[in-house]
Amino acid sequence: MIMLATNWTHVWMVTILGFCLVFLLLVVLIYILKLFGFIMRPRIKVAKPTEVHEAVGAPRKETSESITLTAEATAAIATALHLYYNGVHDEEPTQVTIKKIERRYSPWNSKLYGMNNLHRN
């Protein structure tokens, strides 16, 4: 058998260098994508509430800015909820029927009209 003139130390070195380069580029790509995500993130500041209740069920302190609903607003909300939950829409039939057509011949599926009428003698 004839051995090919191959320097195996160079082959292994190039292989390991290639794998290391691929993994290094993947890590760099991950950090670049995280940087883009940080740059493109919207900068919206949310105002934090100044008063924090001790528990979820803790009673709120009444202030002079409490909201009161008028009778008209209460009636409008009640009407909207009634219409939403009771469904003011058309009732659609839930039965699907497929009607079978009795005629078997249709010019749309006929291969006869697609043929060329070339009479060869």
Image (cartoon, helix red, strand yellow):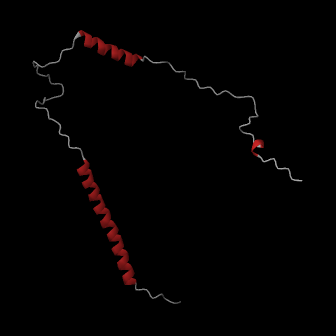
The residue that appears at 25% across and 49% down in the rendered structure is: 40
Based on the displayed image, in which of its 4 quarters is residue 45 positioned?
A: top left
Of residue 8 and residue 91, the one placed in the foreground of this image is 91
- The extreme right residue here reads 121
Based on the displayed image, in which of its 4 quarters is residue 26 positioned?
A: bottom left
Coordinates of residue 72 in the picture (x, y in percent): 26, 10
The residue that appears at 22% across and 11% down in the rendered structure is: 70
The residue that appears at 72% across and 39% down in the rendered structure is: 109
The residue that appears at 45% across and 18% down in the rendered structure is: 89
- The extreme bottom residue here reads 2
Coordinates of residue 75 in the picture (x, y in percent): 29, 11
Instruction: Decide if residue 62 is on the left or right side of residue 5.
Output: left
Above-or-below relation of 26 to 2: above
Coordinates of residue 94 in the picture (x, y in percent): 55, 23
Above-or-below relation of 112 to 81: below
Instruction: Decide if residue 69 is on the left or right side of residue 3.
Output: left
How many tags in the picture? 0
Coordinates of residue 100 in the picture (x, y in percent): 69, 28
Instruction: Decide if residue 105 is on the left or right side of residue 55.
Output: right
Of residue 99 and residue 16, the one placed in the foreground of this image is 99
Above-or-below relation of 6 to 61: below
